[in-house]
Image (spheres, rainbow, N blue to C red):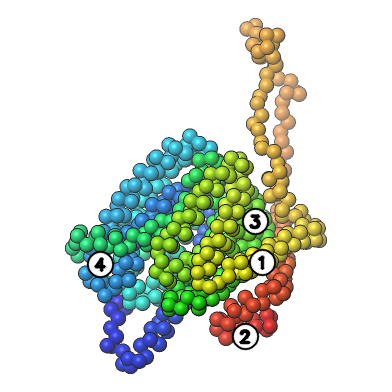
Amino acid sequence: MTQPTPTNPTEQPDQPQAPALLGRTAGRGLSLTLLANVFAKGSAVLAQVVLAIFLTKEDFGLYALAISIQMFIQTFRDGGIRDYVVARQDRYRDLIGAAFWMGLTINILLALGLGAAGHLMASLYARGEFGEKALELPLLMWITAAALPLSTFPTVLSIRLRIDLMFGVMARVTVVSSLVRYGSMIALAVGGFGALSFVIPVVIATLAEWVMYAAANPERPWRLPARVRAWGGILRESVWLVLGSSATGITNYGYYLVAAYFISAQTLGVYFFAISLLMQVETLLTAAFQGTMLPVLTRLRDEPRRLGEAGSRLARAIVLTCAPMSLALAAVFPLIDLLIWNGKWAGAALPIAILAAAYPFRCAMATVPHTLLQAQARFRDWFFMWFRNGCGLVAAAAAAPFIFGDSAEGLAVCVAVFLAVSSLLSTLLCLRPLGIGARALGLRLIRLVLMAVVAAVLTTAAERFVIAPALRQDSAWDRPIRLLTAPPETPAVPTTPASDHGGPTPPSPDASPSPPTEADSPEPASPTPGPGLMARLAARAMTGLHLALTGLVFASLMFMGTRLLAGREVREILSVLPSRLATPASRLFP
């Protein structure tokens, strides 16, 4: 593999062409990175599909609790050394040894804290509604903790590759790491490892990344002196990056810690499964927009008006892109559940539908204020924005059980209401100082989301009253609605005949067991043959047709609504696409 060499401007034969060459390199690297991220997210979705077949709802609930602790602690991982050294690449030789040893020390301490937190949280949550499933938490935490010190090696080795713009190598590492992680995740789930299927692959993938980065980068920073005196300066300068990452972790996962104490493992598992599907949509879109727009917005830092206009266009583009994707998932998920999981996750249909209406606003906040504040180097404001949202979500998760009880739908309602309001306000307040009218933009974003919501509602009505009867099938929404309206099951208590004194009649000492009669002998149950292979395949094919027709209805409604109500936003998106893509699409949206 090509050995990395520092970029040397004097090696360029034609110095004026250097900016163009750098732009082409960055553009190619961005394309490779986005493709690798798309592959990684596709692998994650596939793994979730398979794990949802073999794991229980309680396993998903246990992992939701584990990842909330893990992600909060891991936000402090490495002390921000990667971004710090990349930003100060002119001092790379002086910093890399100290950065490695400081990062390794921090990660060892975090690993010990993560393992100890597993024992503390297990004893705490086992006494709550979560139940004895929480007692499996320490093992998950210690396995996850093992990956923290190991992750220091690939992290530090990747710094040199980032500085030298070796995006192809990093994209290959991402692809191979995804294959290793999600492939082993599927294998462990099939093998019956339960919730351990989520955490063991993290260690395996970390080792694989270490091997690949070591092959690409011959440097060995662990052989350099630690230079402990330099650690304080590194930490002081990277503190807001670390705090901002921790606030992001609280927003994404912190509220699970509160919810898990008041709701059962099964309820948390259903909710986590629902929101995980929507988070795949969010991370795919936000990673693409953030990676593309951050360098562009940074160039406009000294032109507030243009920066605000770019942010406004970005907000409308992300909402117009995310709303159809999230609401389409909400409209067709019950059919996907029947087709893939045979109705096992029907309880997640309504939480997905509720959260899907709020997630476009969440995607806008995770893209526009997040990117704008970083482009303006306002890292303190960036931290407080995420911290406020994280604290609000914790409060919403705490209120949900008292209002709705042990209900995934109730938790989804509280989280969705807060997400929609807080995310929209965060986006508008960030753009207002740049000259963008908050009221006009807010109404525009709400209209784009309502357009997708109406399309999803009409699609659901068409599926229930037109498509399902035409195919002579039950509506896919029948089971989720029954689960919502069914009374809670109470275990049957066996009764015995009462004696004259009010208690059960004691057996007579002289009584001898009577011989069984023919009436007492149970008749052997005749086996009921299940449907044959061809019948099952025909049923799946019919469900697939049901899904395709429902999806076609939603796509048609969104197409008509977009042409009527969102032509301006579509034209803005098309204006930045390559001509080979924009020209055919422009014929559909004149």
Of 450 and 268, the residue lying toward us = 450
Is 405 in front, or is 417?
417
Which residue type does callout 1 highlight?
Arg
Q: Earlier in the sequence, mark 4 or mark 3?
A: 4
Q: Amino acid at mark 2?
A: Thr
Residue 316, given in percent of the width and then of the height, sits at: 59, 71
- What residue is rendered at 63% in x and 48% in y? 409
Q: CA distance from mark 4 to mark 3?
A: 48 Å
Identify the residue under disc 3.
353
- Counting from the top left corner in percent of width and height, residue 407 is at 61, 44
Of mark 2 and mark 1, the one earlier in the sequence is 1
User: Which residue corresponds to mark 1?
Assistant: 447
Residue drawn at point x = 30 percent, y = 50 percent: 109
- Of circles 1 and 4, which is in front? 1
Q: CA distance from mark 3 to mark 2?
A: 34 Å
Sooner in the amino-acid sequence: mark 4 or mark 2: 4
Circle 4 — which element?
helix
Is the residue marked by circle 2 packed among few (<14), some (14-19), or many (20+) residues within 10 Å? few
Left or right, 305 with respect to 560, comes to left
Q: Nearer the viewer, mark 2 or mark 1?
A: 1
Label 1: few (<14), some (14–19) or many (≥20) C-alpha neighbours in 10 Å: some
Question: Please, what is the three-letter code of the amino acid marked with disc 4?
Answer: Ile
On the image, numbered disc 2 is attached to which residue? 583
Q: Secondary structure at mark 1?
A: helix
The x, y position of residue 270, in whole percent, is 58, 49
User: Residue 185: image x %, image y %?
Assistant: 47, 56
Q: CA distance from mark 2 to mark 1?
A: 27 Å
Q: Is residue 400 left or right of residue 241?
A: right
**Which of the numbered marks, if any, corresponds to residue 96?**
4
Using residue 539 as the reference point, say whether residue 168 is left or right of it: left
Q: Residues within 10 Å of mark 4 (few under 14, many from 20)?
A: many
